Image (cartoon, helix red, strand yellow):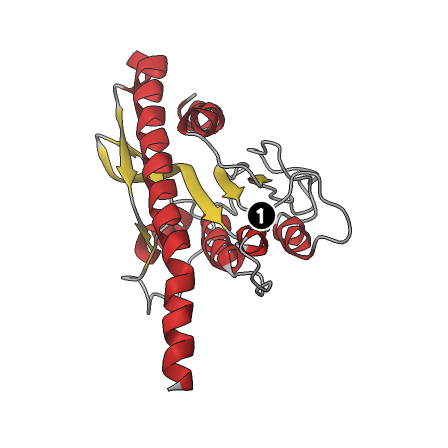
Amino acid sequence: MANSDQLRRSKEQHKPKNVQSKNDEKLIYAAMRQTISYLQVRLGNHLEEYRLEFEREISFDQLIRIIGNSGLRKEFDSTFANRVIKPDGGVILLHKHDDPNYIRLVLVAEVKRQGTNVQRAKEGKARQAQGNAIERLGKNLTGIKAALNHEPLTPFVCFGQGCDFVEDYDETSFVMSKISMMNEFYSLNRTYIFKRDGSSERNHFAPVSMYFREDDWTQEEMFEILKEIGETSIRYYIF
């Protein structure tokens, strides 16, 4: 019975967060669709030979194809080609009408919510261990970085919100230290699109746009960041 009670309490504890996460996904999906509309209007005739597609997932096979199209690598493990990653905000892909093999990553978006301890403190409840939202983020980011290793840009953005994420962090912040490491020790809460600090003789570093704070992100706030990254990506690919 004790185990059953613990399981029930665990499920009840996650219900509010699951509802919030679904709302977060709706907002970022709307922001991504708003971004596609903006890009189609903004770039107009420049996109005549291309089409933009919004997908909720991208398969390992597509990621491998993106790498393979570079011509720089021939060896792949295709065992899991049918597996997919599902970024919370989906992906925007660029295709070319006259080339079925042409596929480029324009934008990948995540939204992560983590932290219930502020609310639990208000309710007089004990603190809980901090969650694993950023561990899931790291898995997807690894796949995207691999697919874009040969490109000079990494158009990936994550919006984090919740009491585990603080904008004014210091050395005592355990969760933010993980995110800093995930971003290759580059600053958080700023936009990175192109790789940095490398040369023709050395590998580049690939920081991405990691925006984390306690307050919720609005659709319009996310859109303002997404459109900049998306437009920069397309301009790189087609000009």
Q: 215 or 201, which is in the foreground? A: 215
Residue 145: give x, y in percent of width and height.
Answer: 51, 49
Q: 201 or 224, which is in the foreground? A: 224
Q: Specify whether residue 89 is in view.
A: no
Q: In the current view of this chain or complex, which residue is farthest to the right? A: 171
Q: Quadrant of residue 3?
A: bottom left
- Give the position of the N terminus as an image quadrant: bottom left
Residue at horizontal 66%, vertical 37%? 196
Badge 1 crowding class, 10 Å Cα cut-off, few under 14, some 14 to 19, many 20 or more, is some
Q: Quadrant of residue 200?
A: top right
Q: 2 or 160, which is in the foreground? A: 2
Residue type, label 1: Cys
Residue at horizontal 48%, vertical 48%? 113
Residue at horizontal 42%, vertical 58%? 74
Name the side, left or right, on which 13 lies relative to 192. left
Name the side, left or right, on which 167 lies relative to 227. right
What kind of element bears circle 1? loop
Residue 60: give x, y in percent of width and height.
Answer: 34, 57
- 64 above or below 162? below
Q: Quadrant of residue 83?
A: bottom left
Q: Specify whether residue 131 is in view.
A: yes
> Which residue position holds label 1?
163
Q: In the current view of this chain or complex, which residue is farthest to the front? A: 124
- Give the position of the C terminus as an image quadrant: top left
Residue 51: give x, y in percent of width and height.
Answer: 25, 28
- 171 above or below 96? below
Residue at horizontal 42%, vertical 24%? 220
